[in-house]
Image (spheres, rainbow, N blue to C red):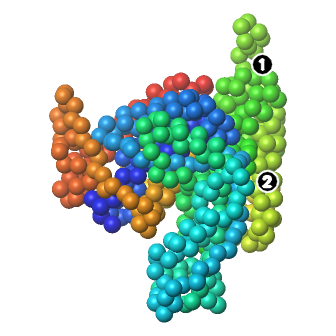
Amino acid sequence: MSLNESPIIVGLDIGTTKIAAIAGRKNEFGKLEILGFGRANSSGVQHGQVLNIDQTIKAIQQALANCYESNPDLEVKEVYVGIAGHHIKSLQTRGDMVRQEPDNEIQGWEIDQLVNNQRKTFIPAGDQIIDVIPQDFHVDNIQNIKDPVGFNGVKVGANFHIITGDRNAIRNINRAVERSGLSTKDLVLQPLASASAVMSEIDMEAGVAILDIGGGTSDLAVFYEGILKHTAVIPFGGENITNDIRLGLGVLKSQAEAMKVQFGSALADEAKANAYITIPGLKGMPAKEISVKNLAQVIQARMSEILDFVSYHLKQVGLDSRALNGGVILTGGGSQLKHLIQLTEYTTGLNARIGLPNEHLAPNHIEELKKPMYSTCIGLILKGYNDYEHHNKDFQLAFVKVNVPSVLTKQEEEVKMEVPVAAPAVNVANRKNKFWNMFKDNLIDMFKEEEDHIIK
């Protein structure tokens, strides 16, 4: 697929601690080139659910403003949005369809019809189907078919993984997105988005559990023999750890977060017994000394609880330590805790590693986007490309809109010529390099400004 054929797809990750908007386009090598990136602190979301719509709208608009600041030529209308929260449930179903013309090969539209029929599955009142994912197909007596298109037979069917969510929670997300001046192209379960960003085909075949430790929830997706076997949303995340530190050690929330990031460890045995953190006293009160070992004990207690949930879910679907050769892939902001890999391996009995979202990124992306906290957002763009490549939705082959400001430097004039970014790479090679350099410089400056405000 050449660069000038690909649409620009935007992922919007509405999280408990941050809202991120990333715009990307696949290049001629099938890698994602990031065309815009913005983030903002989130305050209207708790445990993955939008509770305060007005605050969420402000945060979305701030993230979009930062995205436009990184690339003023960008125009965002439609977004792929991640969804999580402990209201998310999943169920397994089986569906079959008798074909009208069994002598002809199975066509793609017949499989679409089979999938859409599952959307009529009975679910509890107040819930809504978010996604229907085929696991494996069967045609007549032939089982375990990955893709039945091209087969022929009388009856085609499949096992399905159906993901549902609370109707009001879904409505709140859509409302916040629409009132921010955008439209939702599709809602995607966050663990599936994260999985697509950090997982390879080999991982999927070997069997792997993806654990995305976010701010308000920890999301789990389990794959085995190339099939999605299970999804779950665990209602604890990084915010719970911060809150535990705040209450357990008697400090402010901002101090608890700073201590967790700078000195936190998921294994108390690995923490230094004689190391202390000095917290300044409030309004003339004496300074407080916090033991690094006590801090690690608080973190380990909550992380062990999250990992016990993972072990429980793996046992529920019969995939214990012998079945998942790929082990556990940890991603999301919470995965950056020191010694978390060791705790995960000890608790689950599986090998563990950190999943970074750079596998699908073009080599010229900025370092910031390599962080596991952006896995969901980059996965949302990949989900959009999956829809585009399988013709599941209509896409506008939009160019990056170019608005030339009245005053430009000589370098900017060369970048912002009338040739859109989507023009063939041969004609714009030099200009494209300059565009990327400027884009990266803009982003790096933004992060430097943001870091100045972080508590040291």
**Residue 243: % across, % down:** 75, 32
Q: Which numbered tag is attached to residue 410?
A: none
Q: Residue at x 78, y 33 (%)?
A: 244
353 lies above or below 45: below
Is residue 354 among what the camera can see? no
Marks 2 and 1 in Cβ contact (< 8 Å): no
**Residue 86: % across, % down:** 71, 47
| Quadrant in which residue 320 is drawn | bottom right
Q: Residue at x 64, y 43 (%)?
A: 168
Q: Which one is nearer the viewer's eye here, 190 or 347?
A: 190
Whether residue 392 sits left or right of residue 456 in the image: it is left
Q: Residue at x 77, y 72 (%)?
A: 322
Residue occupied by mark 1: 288
| Quadrant in which residue 74 is drawn | top left
Secondary structure beneath label 2: helix
Secondary structure beneath label 1: strand
The amino acid at mark 1 is Lys
Residue occupied by mark 2: 309
**Residue 106: % across, % down:** 49, 84
Q: Residue at x 37, y 36 (%)?
A: 68
**Residue 10: % across, % down:** 43, 48
